[in-house]
Image (spheres, rainbow, N blue to C red):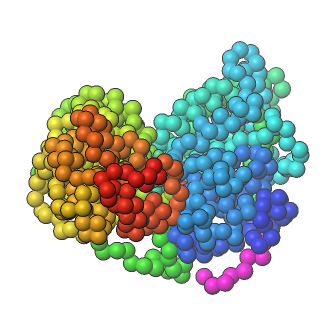
Amino acid sequence: MAKNKTYPHLDRVDSPADLKKLDRQEVQSLCRELREFLIESVAETGGHLGASLGTVELTTALHYVYNTPDDLLVWDVGHQTYPHKILTGRKGRMKTMRKRDGLAGFPARSESPYDSFGVGHSSTSISAATGMALGLGNYSQSGGASEASSGLAAAQQATNALQATESGNTMELDSHTPVNSDERHVVAIIGDGALTAGLAYEALNHAGGLRSNMLVILNDNDMSISPNVGAMNKYLARILTGKFYSTARESGKLVLSKLPSMVEELARRTEEHLKGMVVPCTLFEELGFNYFGPVDGHDLDSLIDVLGNLRKLNGPLFLHVVTRKGKGYPFAEEDALALHAVTPFDPETGKALASGSSKLTYTKVFGNWLCDMAERNEELVAITPAMREGSGLVEFEQRFPDRYFDVGIAEQHAVTLAAGLACVGKKPIVAIYSTFLQRAYDQLVHDVAIQNLPVMFAIDRAGLVGPDGATHAGSFDLTFMRCLPNLLLMAPADENECRRMLSTGYAWDGPSAVRYPRGSGPGVAVEQELQPLEIGKAEIIRRGNSGIALLAFGSMVSAAQSVAEDFDATVVNMRFIKPLDESLITEIAGSHQVLVTLEENSISGGAGSAVMEYLAATGVHTPVQLVGLPDEFVEHGSREELLAYCKLDKAGLKERLSLIATRYEAGLPKTTQRLTS
Ligand SMILES: Cc1ncc(C[n+]2csc(CCOP(=O)(O)OP(=O)(O)O)c2C)c(N)n1
């Protein structure tokens, strides 16, 4: 791929309005350039490559046909929206993608009026789109004769639309007509992976029942991050191979066209039922949607025709589009999994520019521990909600396939499944990112904690995650978990402690959680033993004489150590957020002038708050300063930049501690200035 390529068509497009000025042939050329520009730009910045390559034609067709941003495109997950960003005025900022103050890696309402809904987590699109359709008044209540007739009208329109498209007729687009509130169109674009989540079905159920005027596009590439799983995935595959259906429908249409009109209408009325009896692709129709497809998602002309026709229809519509992840870039097509999300790479070879760090990541520490523990304990089972690679389960799946469950993007189900397994004597481990555990909070409380079931949560990406930004930050797990009775909650200071905590949680006869950050730790060697820790025991790492004690949790222990000498501070590795080492806190509070708690979690309600609650309950008045994540959603950037922004890096901590030391020099606070937040 030549450097400094020119993009004659793409250069003329800074908005969908520019796109609409191009003729069909030019739009074809634009798609080719868009794909090349995308590869060139992601090669430099890193980011989500495969999914975005797969949506080049679909995105272009959508903006060509619809009147965005008045018409609302609601993307699911949002990792496939780089083409959307390029076509909606952000082309010039693509080199800032996922960098501090640069473009977000996902749609964000604050970034562009074309981003109708902020996203990052999956399976929200149909719900949000339904809300938009209802809010715009684009629906009719279900029930009664009116529904039957509107259903019939829709079926009539749908048949016409398909016939127009399939016969090669290009319907004239009316995308320049003025838009009234009730004419605004709403389109949700969801992947087959995202369609494994319950939320998507809750929305389909509601939208189909209400007869919302909206289009749901299923972008089916047969992949989640790793190969997609589950019965729905098999069902979609059956639709794609369902030659029988197309044949039946084709001959059905022939027959229908020869019937007198009343009989034809009657026949159409029963069409859905007939299809239900003879073909497998009626599930979406049973939910109240008119199903269209499958359509080749890389055939731009057909897509434009189909979307142009569907835009004229009312009622809930479902378009099944088949795409290929990584389309048009051979390295990404061959290895869709590896090129789902990439670091900067050489576009000529598809190879990463920097070889990955050789340091052991916490993810790997967990993966190794899991296999070692599974060898010794046959009751151990591991569950992932569609994050096999990210959570370190690849080796476990290979070695213990019968004890491995990828449940799809279904965090709620993952947790309740674990509860069920625990009920019959299994020892389930739920490997989950902190941010995705938020989805399963009720399951955590109601299904696991209340019943005191021995489910262990291995919580990866706890704390700041970096380029994925606020939607993926694990800022809240200590806050939302430490309030739960029965739960053992730990945060390791280093790799070996992580392994020991996993063994501790596993041995605990109740719910437990170990939360560890993204990436690697301080580099401590990991023992082979599976040695638990003493429950609720913290460790004094350094005794200082300044009167300042740093009570550090998890990743903040080494940060505290790095500044302790400068302030001659005491450093405690707290290890347990629940139960706290209360006697040690009492002792330290009695022998120091000020306690500083440090955590990579929201200050609000986090581990520091737990220390304060304990001191308040026992009537100890030693001042406490809380250091952690601020009360704001920290946007994207590198993890190092974000830690610096939050003053949790060495320089930031020094600054904070200098202020604290000054304030408490005389034993009493001198100002009312806020020192930490
Ligand atoms: C609630 C939630 N769980 C997990 C993820 C991580 N994740 C990001 S993309 C993805 C796969 C999505 O698959 P699909 O919707 O088919 O899109 P594709 O990447 O195949 O285009 C997953 C699991 C997420 N974003 N949100």
Q: Does residue 267 show up?
A: no
User: Which of 258/109 is in front?
Assistant: 109
Q: Where does residue 14 sit, x and y in percent of width and height?
A: 77, 65
Q: Quadrant of residue 367?
A: bottom left
Residue 613 locus on image (x, y percent): 30, 37
**Which is more toward the observer, 473 or 602?**
602
- Establish if 436 lies above or below 263: below
- Judge whether residue 260 is colored magenta: no
The quarter of the picture where the N terminus appears is: bottom right
Q: Is residue 151 left or right of residue 622?
A: right
How far from the left and from the top, in percent, is residue 361?
30, 65
Percent of width and height locating residue 358: 30, 74
* Residue at x 20% of width, y 36% of height: 510
Q: Is residue 4 above or below residue 137?
A: below
Q: Would you say 616 lies left or right of 673 here?
A: left
Identify the residue at horizontal 22%, vertical 43% (top origin). Answer: 580
* Quadrant housing residue 257: top right
Residue 33 relative to residue 590: left or right? right
